Amino acid sequence: MDWSSLSPLSLIATMVVASIPIMLAATGELVVEKSGVLNLGVEGMMITGAVAGFIAAVESDSHVIAVIAAAAAGSAMSLFFGVLTQFLKSNHVATGLALTIFGLGVSSLVGQNYTGVKPPQFPKPEFGPLGDIPILGKIIFGYDYLVYVAFLTVLGVWLFLAYSRAGLILRAVGENHDAAHALGYKVKSVRLLAIMFGGAAAGLGGAYLSLIRVPQWTDGMTAGAGWIALAIVVFGSWRPWRVMAGALLFGGVTLLQLNLQAVGLEINAAYLSMAPYVITILVLVAISTKHSGMSANAPASLGKPFHPSS
Amino acid sequence: MISLKKSLRAASAVAATALLFATPGLSEPLKVGFIYVGPISDFGWTYEHDQGRLAVESALGDSVETTYVENVPEGADAERVLTQLALAGNNLIFATSFGYMDPVVNVAQKFPNVMFEHATGYKRADNVSTYSARFYEGRAVIGTIAGRMTETNTIGYVASYPIPEVVRGINAAYIHAKKVNPDVEFKIVWVYTWFDPAKEADAATALIDQGADIIMQHTDSPAPVSMAEEKGLYAFGQASDMKEFGPNARLSSIIDNWSPYYVARAQAALDGTWASEDAWHGINEGMVEIGEFSDAIPAEVQAEAQALADAISAGEYHPFTGPINKQDGSPWLADGEVADDITLLGMNFYVEGLEGEVPN
Amino acid sequence: MIRLERRRAPSRIWSFLAPLAAVGATLVGGAVIFSLLGKNPFEVLTTIFWSPLFDPNLSAYARPQLLVKATPLILIAAGLSLGFRAGIWNIGAEGQYIVGAIFGGAVALAFYPEEGWYIFPLMVAAGALGGIAWAMIPAILRIRFNTNEILVSLMLVYIAVQFLAAMSLGALRNPEGSGFPGSRNLQYYESASNPELVAGTGIHWGGLTAVAALACLYVLLHRHILGFHIRLAGESPRAARFSGARPALLVAFCLGVSGGLAGLAGLFELAGPSGQISIDFNVGYGFTAIIVAFLGRLNPIGILFAGLLVALTYIGGEMAQFMLGLPAAAIQAFQGMLLFFLLAMDLFLNYRIVFGAGARA
């Protein structure tokens, strides 16, 4: 086995690209959960975004339109969940699962005529001489636009939650909806907006998959990425930077597993494939044993039904 | 004498079974049912089976009526769907995944008058045929092209599960790449899935990072071809042509072409000559089709690959012809010896020269 | 002004009307989808809901199949409903289902080809144990480290799936299977098989266990202090603690029961309808059962009906595929819609719509 042939540079670059779909979806879900809502329909929203973005890209040949369409479609999907859970008081867990089933079905129906179609190539921003810097050029300036959008989303969500008044309200709603309601905040509207943001982010994540990472549309192509995103939110203990790190770590472990095989490491691939999940659990345990960890940061009203009693 | 008797008996058995099957009268079309493990839009395995179904419709017109059920999981659900297809009056049923084997056998027992065709399995009965394709013949051809075309002498292989079908493909490709390029090296990544575009893309990327400039795959999604296209490298279409996914990257492809077989079997059912058989067809019968060679392949390599395909097709050459040693150096096939089908069907070892182990 | 007012007690009338209203709404929505696809909506809907039950050719077979399909869903949902009531979220039943099947299957294969009455009971015990063991991982982590059980149980599904692949290709592979993945078929191994108890009924040991589980669930919830604590824990954890509930015990109990039932479901499915440990053995019952549990309002009788209804849409959906050429995706979208409406209509169970300003203003 030749370890030297493992290039950390290209590993990092691929890791970043591999983690973008879950990073986007998880960041969106983080906002949703921070508002006290648990939406298990991430997979359904991602795949809807994937197909919508793909169709828009093919039909319009415009990347901006594709991105908007993906976000809008994810958001529209999330509205089903939002209206059901917020106004019709349905159970979050079951509604989220139903959303996944619905999304998978609808995306497959809508996308039937688009398998085997090639989407337009997604452009990369030009950083001029910056891109030629030996190491940084590749791992910082070598990506397409959406990668930067994803990182900016993480940054934006962090700023929003930590420093904005609206973010404070959102957290208050997630922490104690009754108190927030008593203070005059519109709990349902806040949550609905959060849900729609989550849908948009998931849709974007899905579109990253269909437009850039694997530029093609195939039925069921998210193949469980939405579930991973859900896990990453908890893994990141509801903090944007940790969620980002979690997405990178997860993408990295999966990739490393494949790379180790390519290098020729003699280890059973079935067990290697378990590694990302085992590591997620281990890290999670490590985090949750510290008192400052996730339990302190979990939104207290997560998944609980809200009804203003008087 | 004995053998004559045996073959006579066999012949009369075939005749008897053929008579057993109730063939519909002139007015009634033959109903042909298909059960698929994936969606027909997967652009791989299931897509090609459905192309076969459409070919039956267009070839036999009004004398047949076809239906299908897609996304049927193997196991209990398959048994139910098969039974319902039989109950709904289908006379001939194609079950297109290995995991449907025991369900097919169970249901066939209950419906002795319905003809069943099971892909890639090995259990047969009077009303159960099996059919499979000698994809390794195609692998030999694309292995030759890959061996000639690689500049880094490294070929990346995205493999699904360590089953004989996949191992056989790796061996066939390697033997023929090595034949034309003694320095060639195979890097194999097992992804443990048939279909996960993102993971397949990652595996292809990992292989490319390890110096592979040609990607082969034995998974169903076109993602590896797309990745090769993006990196400006080469790949081969798998199951379907996949040219759309890599106009520059795709050198050729191994296409599963079930149409000739499906049409012939439906025709036999119509004629009342259908009998249980074990079909393992290759390039010759048209079940394995080599996709058009891309212009990126130099003419002499094209000619070489074509000649190999022709020799295989004509039965002049078998891709597993000795001398071939197993990976550990122990002899497998002597000079000029040809592998028998039984060994090929259960192949779970690498040939000499391949690195790594078949995981299990 | 329209607003919702919480009912003091769930409405009895609406507990019957809600599902009917939901089905009605779905019929309208489905009619739209199906006509957009160019199919006769009436024909599609009767095929999905009517044919499995009453089609002269197909129903004799399809009716018992409904029970076969519903059995694992009900069995798993029954266990999950306990935890869901107590606010303990096991969403990894799929993993427990897989591990239960692997454990039980391994016992059977260890005895092969020996015949004996004791083999099947041992398999059942192993199956339950496998499910419990897998569920105890999130339980212990939650109790000991306060680790979120939703995530751990979900991650364990993926680990179980890989484990299943490794077993089908490795230790449990059929040595006479020419190297193909998958174990021996237990349907052909008499002492280990779980056939229909009475031919043509679709009822195997799993079905009986499901009914027994529902009955126990009912008794537990309404007649036993533990059930009281479970219900209380979901409504008010603090009140539960005051009344003497031990949170750790509740977590272990709820996860253990749901894991055990999921493991049993896996074992019965393996030894019965499915037959084989194979890479694709699991087909999502563990996730679908979560929906079944909520459709059934976490209530034993509700779960029974919800399981049957969901099974009906699967079987009817297949019929719509081969009788009418409807794509599987359309059925899936239709199922999602039906679930949406069913969940939405439950609103009327607990709330009434009040028009006008009302007392609050």
Image (spheres, coloured by chain):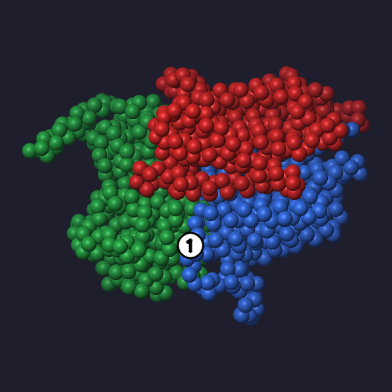
Chain colours: A blue, B green, C red
Residue A139 visible in the displayed image: yes
Q: Position of residue A253 (x, y in %)?
A: 60, 60
Q: Please name the residue shown 24% across and 35% down the image.
A: B274
Q: Left of C94 or right of it: where is B73?
A: left
The residue to which callout 1 is attached is: A266
> Would you identify the image quadrant in which residue C209 lies?
top right
Q: Is residue B132 left or right of residue B17?
A: right
Outermost left residue: B1
Give amino acid for label 1: Glu
**B352 shown above or below A44:** below
Where is residue A120 drawn, in percent x and y? 53, 62
Disc 1 crowd rating (10 Å Cα; few below 14, some 14-19, many 20+) is some
Q: Chain of mark 1?
A: A
Image spot of residue C316 (x, y percent): 50, 29
State the image quarter where residue C229 is shown. Answer: top right
- Residue lying at 77% horizontally and 23% vertically, measured from the top left: C10
* Count of labels in the image: 1
Q: Position of residue C194 (x, y in %)?
A: 47, 28
Looking at the rendering, which quadrant does residue C76 occupy? top right
Q: Quadrant of the N terminus of chain B?
A: top left
Q: Residue at x 81, y 55 (%)?
A: A292
Image position of B276 (left or right of A30):
left
Q: On screen, C269 above or below C278?
A: above
Q: Secondary structure at mark 1?
A: loop
Question: Which residue is painted at 44% across and 20% down in the image?
Answer: C199
